[in-house]
Image (cartoon, grey):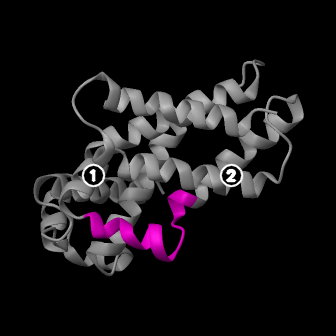
Amino acid sequence: MASIRHKKDAVLDATRDCVLAVGVRRTTLTDVARRAGVSRMTIYRRWPDVRTLVADLMTREWAAVVSRVAPPEDGSPVRVQAVEALVTGVAALRAHPLFHKIMQVDPEVLLPYILERRGTSQEAMLRAIEATLRAGHRDGSVRAGDPARQARSLLLVLQSFAMSGHIMTEDGPALSAAAFDEELRQILERYLAP
């Protein structure tokens, strides 16, 4: 099992390196196999094409971002922790090299997850946000409401700040990324406050 996991990680690492070097459209399974030190057949057994390979890579990378910014369970009010974790998560995603490269070179890769269907990463984010909201309902720091609907509403806002934030920022303190992070913090705080 560890060998399979190691091989999968090696292939995903190689995919990340290829995408960072040349973008999604110019990445080939042959290039990935060469970088990973495996045969093309090893890759084809699990991933039929670059699209599915990149989808698995994005899931791994975005899940890592989410796991790093989960609110701590230290007994303090959930809303305060959740707002900070969500703002930090959006900023971390925007700064992520893979996300940045895809947005810069191959933004169409993300379109299905905006226009057609939820992806694995979005489902994981929804579960995490919903669990946090339920905890906030229990401690009274998050306004009452349907946690699934609230989580989906929050994800819509977060996605817009992550994916479109760069087109709204400009040089100078008033329109900087940090200024928009503060606006997001205010939006989230007011939306979640009881």
Mark in the foreground, 1 or 2 = 2
Q: Which mark is residue 151?
A: 2
Q: Which residue is found at the position 14% from the left and 58% from the top?
A: 35
Instruction: Indicate the quadrant containing the C terminus: top left, top right, bottom left or bottom right.
Output: top right
Residue at the far front: name it.
174
Visible residue check, residue 82: yes
Given the image, on which type of amino acid does mark 1 rest? Answer: Asp
Q: Secondary structure at mark 2?
A: helix
Q: Give the crowd class for mark 2: few <14, some 14-19, many >=20 residues within 10 Å.
A: many
**38 horizontally vs 76: left or right:** left
Q: Main secondary structure of the magenta part?
A: helix
The answer to whether marks 1 and 2 mark residues whose Cβ atoms lie closer than 8 Å is: no
The quarter of the displayed image where residue 46 is located: bottom left
Q: Height in image: 106 above or below 190?
A: below
Given the image, on which type of amino acid does mark 2 rest? Answer: Ala
Q: Which mark is residue 13?
A: 1
Q: Position of residue 190 (x, y in %)?
A: 68, 34
Q: Which residue is found at the position 48% from the left and 27% from the top?
A: 182
Q: What is the span of residues highlighted in magenta in the rendered image? A: 107-122
The quarter of the displayed image where residue 126 is located: bottom right
Q: Is residue 172 magenta?
A: no
Q: Tag 2 or tag 1, which sits nearer the N-term?
A: 1
Q: Height in image: 20 above or below 90?
A: below
Q: Position of residue 41 (x, y in %)?
A: 25, 78
Visible residue check, residue 72: no
Q: Is residue 113 magenta?
A: yes
Front residue (pair 91, 48)? 91
Q: Secondary structure at mark 1?
A: helix
Q: Which residue is found at the position 57% from the left and 27% from the top?
A: 84
